[in-house]
Structures are given as C-alpha cells and as structure tokens.
C-alpha cells in the first residue's frame, strides 16, 4: 500500500477497526443453550463459533499492528519530504554545487524500503471441552395402549312367507288385417274438348245528372253587384239592401278605397248528361268440339290394411320368500386404556462447556514499501569537462558488458567510438531504469557512471 493511499484510507481503516470490534463483541455475547436432545450438535456449533471469534480477534490485532506500522512510515516519509524540499532551494539552482561539476535536473525513480511486519501464522482460538450431562433411570407409568371402543354387530332377523312371483309379464302383440280391393268402372278421356276465346265489348248508357250548389255567402266588390251586368254605385250599397240578384248582409271599406259587400249567393241547380259504363269489356271461352270419353274397369283399394292389438295375460307362480323383519345393527363397547411401568432416563444435570484459550501464532515477514515517489532532482552529470573520448569509450564498454545496449550494427552492443550518440543515450537510460537510478533524456548522471564502476 502506498503512503498516499494510507493517508486517504486512514478514516476507512479506523471505521473497519470499529466494525470488527462490534462484530467481535456481538459474537462474544451470543447466548448458548444446551439441550438434552442435541448435545453433539450444540458442541459442534459452539466450537465453530469460538473458532470464528478467535479468527476475528486475530484479524483485529493484525489490523492494529498494520495501522501502527503505516502511521510510523507516514511520519518518516513526511519528514524525508520536508528535508528534500529544504535542500531543493525551490528548484531554481542545484543544492550545494561543487566547482568543476555539471548539474542537470533529471528523473529520480521511486525508492523502496524493506519493511518488517508480523503476519498471523495461526489465529487465536478457543478449545471448548464438553462436560457431558448426568442422567438417572427411574420407573415411570407409561401408557401402552390408549382407551378405545369397538363395534359389536347384532345380526338381522328374517321370516319366510309365500307369495306369487311374476314368471312372464303381460304382453301384447300386433296382428295384421289385410287390405280389401274392388273393381270399378271409370271413364277415361280419349280426346279433350276444343275451345276458343271470344272478346265481348263494353256496354254504356247515357244518364242525366243534376248538380246543386247550395246557398252561401261571399265577399264581393260593390262594383261587381250591378243588375244584368251593370255595376252598382257605391252610394247605393248598405246592409239590408238588395242589389241586383244579391242581398247585402254586411259592408266594409278596404285600405285601397274599395267597398266590399258580404252578399248571399242563392242556391243554383245545374243539369248535364254523361255516359256511364254498364258492363265492362271481357273475354269468354266457348266450346268448338265436345270431349270424347271411354269406359274402362280399374281395381281400387276399398279398405286399407290395418293392425289390431291382441293382449296375452301374465303368468304367475307361488313361491316361498325370505323377508327382512329387523335389519342388522351395531352397538359400541368401550375398551379401557392399558398402562405399564417402564424405566425412564431423566436428566439430572445438563451438559456444560469449558473454554480453553489457544493464543495466536505470528511470523515476521518482510516486504518492499515505497518511501519515495518518482520525481525530478538536481544531480551531477557528464559535461564538457569530463566527457572526453576516452571516458565515453569506457562508458560504452561498460554498458556493453552490462548488456544494456540493444542497438548498433550487431543489434546488441554499442559502437565504442568515444561519441555520445542516440544508441549510447538509450543504453544509459535503459540501465538507469533497470537499476532505479536517476536519469535524463539528454544527460548521463554521475550516479550511473559510479554504478558502472567508472571514475571520471
């Protein structure tokens, strides 16, 4: 676990510690009951829960030790970071430069430290010894057979009597009466009659008819009431006057200035003649030639065939018959319960348990813990002062011996020519990364030079 992760997860670790403590406390307070019917099962379950309790206790101790170790490591890392920050002088100039040396800001790979910690080899547990229960045997009255009832059958009673038994029931059969025929004489048509259709015209007569128009009243203009076609004057018309052929009953003046008179129109009779249909036109058929017949004899059915029903009486025989006088019945008889004395095993003292604590076993293991992250730092590097051709050749030779070169003409060695080229720089960076040494893209740090065993 990284130190930064320890800082972030410190509250979570504390919460986990509290949760484990709560679980352990809950398990420790669980009640245990031993019963006479399941001592073996109770012992097994108790052993399982005690083992789980010991495992949780040991896990809690391990978490405590780990938390303490991580807290100490965190404090040490913070102190180291403050020391490096003071030496860096804000990153503007290298700290403590020496005359005749060149410096560059290069990549410093993460640094790891070996941390020793305790691991649980065997968790703490408890051994539970079961103290068996104590019993005693005593006689006890036990029900062997419960009280019951049984049914006793009372047989039925019968008597023998004589009675008539139907042997053959009454039946009916149908007898067929044959049909009766007779010979008669009948006339048969030889030639049919010949007829023709004749049209008879309609008949009419002239009659005189009188139409009467009854007396009635009517409004007329006074100018239309003159005698014999002469109009009457308006001044001569008033109620009760006689104007021409009309008697005036009432008068009125219209908005147009015309004088209207209500007059009596006398009854009028008119006589006129008209033709009336007496008999409508029709068609009739008349015989031109009479039909021709001949007499022949024919046998016809006089009386059809019929059926008549004949009854055959039933047949009986006198026999002896057994009759039920009293049906079969049952009565209930009570059977008392049965008891016996048997030895019974009774519990005197229930099973108990005895807990024996078994301490946990630990072993010390080591692991790599990061104490410094990847960062950049001012470091001494090769420059014009000490980067002579002889020094570069020595550097190339050392890199070839370490197997860091993977270029050149052969593909696995740098050319020893005393010139810092791309192949040599790639080999330096590869070697620095493998050894977790500081390095730069365009620089050869003195840390790499010294690790190769060179003194420039």
Image (tube, rainbow, N blue to C red):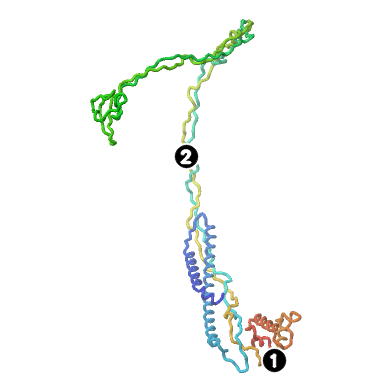
Q: Residue visible at 49% across and 64% down? A: 27
Instruction: Give the class, few, some or many, for how many residues have Cα within 10 Å of label 1's Cα (few <14, many ≥20).
Output: some
Locate residue 109: give its quadrant. Answer: bottom right
Q: Is residue 25 visible?
A: yes
The image shows a total of numbered marks equal to 2
Q: Position of residue 370 (x, y in %)?
A: 58, 78
Locate residue 198: give its quadrant. Answer: top right
Q: Position of residue 2 (x, y in %)?
A: 56, 76
Q: Whole-Å distance between the Cαs marked 1 and 2?
A: 122 Å
Name the element at disc 1.
loop
Give left or right: position of 245 versus 52. Answer: left
Q: 297 or 221: which is nearer to us? A: 221
Q: Nearer the viewer, mark 1 or mark 2?
A: 1
Against 231, residue 3 (above or below) is below
Q: What mark, if any, has residue 271 been given in the picture?
A: none
Against 306, residue 152 (above or below) is below
Whichever of labels 1 and 2 marks the residue nearer the N terminus, that label is 2
Q: Quadrant of the N terminus?
A: bottom right
Residue topped by disc 2: 147
Instruction: Give the class, few, some or many, for how many residues have Cα within 10 Å of label 2's Cα (few <14, many ≥20).
Output: few
Q: Residue furthest toward the front?
A: 230
Q: Residue visible at 57% across and 70% down? A: 122
Q: 355 or 296: which is nearer to us? A: 296
Q: Residue visible at 57% across and 10% down? A: 286
Q: Is residue 65 visible?
A: no
Q: What mark, if any, has residue 388 been given in the picture?
A: 1
Q: Position of residue 18 (x, y in %)?
A: 48, 70
Q: Position of residue 451 (x, y in %)?
A: 66, 86
Locate residue 173: give its quadrant. Answer: top right
Q: Quadrant of the C terminus?
A: bottom right
């Amino acid at each position: 676990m990284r130190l930064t992760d320890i800082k972030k997860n410190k509250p979570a670790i504390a919460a986990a510690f509290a949760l484990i403590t709560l679980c352990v406390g809950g398990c420790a307070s669980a009640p245990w009951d031993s019963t006479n019917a399941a001592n073996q099962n109770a012992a097994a379950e108790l052993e399982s829960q005690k083992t789980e309790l010991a495992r949780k206790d040991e896990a809690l101790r391990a978490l405590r030790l780990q938390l303490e170790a991580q807290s100490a490591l965190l404090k040490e890392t913070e102190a180291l970071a403050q020391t490096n920050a003071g030496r860096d002088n804000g990153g503007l100039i290298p700290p403590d430069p020496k005359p005749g040396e060149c410096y560059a800001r290069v990549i410093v790979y993460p640094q790891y430290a070996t941390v020793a910690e305790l691991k649980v080899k065997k968790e703490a547990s408890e051994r539970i010894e079961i103290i068996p229960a104590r019993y005693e045997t005593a006689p006890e009255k036990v029900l062997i057979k419960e009280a019951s009832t049984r049914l006793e059958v009372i047989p039925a009673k019968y008597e023998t009597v004589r009675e008539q038994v139907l042997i053959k029931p009454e039946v009916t059969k149908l007898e067929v009466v044959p049909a009766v025929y007779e010979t008669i004489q009948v006339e048969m048509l030889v030639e049919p009659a010949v007829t023709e259709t004749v049209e008879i015209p309609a008949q009419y007569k002239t009659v005189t008819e009188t139409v009467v128009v009854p007396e009635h009243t009517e409004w007329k203009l006074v100018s239309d009431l003159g005698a014999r076609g002469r109009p009457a004057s308006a001044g001569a018309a008033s109620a009760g006057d006689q104007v021409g052929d009309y008697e005036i009953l009432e008068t009125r003046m219209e908005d147009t200035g015309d004088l209207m008179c209500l007059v009596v129109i006398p009854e009028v009779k008119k006589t006129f003649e008209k033709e009336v249909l007496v008999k409508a036109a029709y068609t009739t058929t008349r015989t031109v030639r009479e039909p021709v017949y001949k007499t022949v004899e024919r046998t016809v059915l006089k009386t059809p065939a019929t059926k008549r029903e004949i009854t055959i009486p039933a047949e009986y025989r006198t026999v002896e018959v057994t009759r039920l006088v009293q049906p079969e019945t049952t009565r209930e008889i009570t059977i008392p319960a049965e008891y016996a004395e048997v030895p019974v095993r009774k519990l005197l003292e229930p099973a108990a348990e005895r807990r024996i604590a078994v301490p946990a076993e630990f072993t010390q293991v080591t692991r790599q813990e990061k104490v410094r992250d990847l960062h950049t730092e001012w470091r001494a590097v090769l420059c014009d002062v000490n980067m002579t051709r002889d020094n570069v050749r020595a550097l190339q030779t050392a890199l070839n011996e370490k197997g860091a070169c993977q270029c050149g003409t052969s593909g696995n060695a740098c050319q020893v020519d005393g010139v810092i080229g791309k192949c040599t720089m790639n080999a330096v960076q590869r070697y620095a990364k493998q050894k977790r040494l500081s390095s730069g893209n365009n620089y050869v740090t003195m840390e790499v030079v010294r690790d190769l065993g060179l003194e420039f």
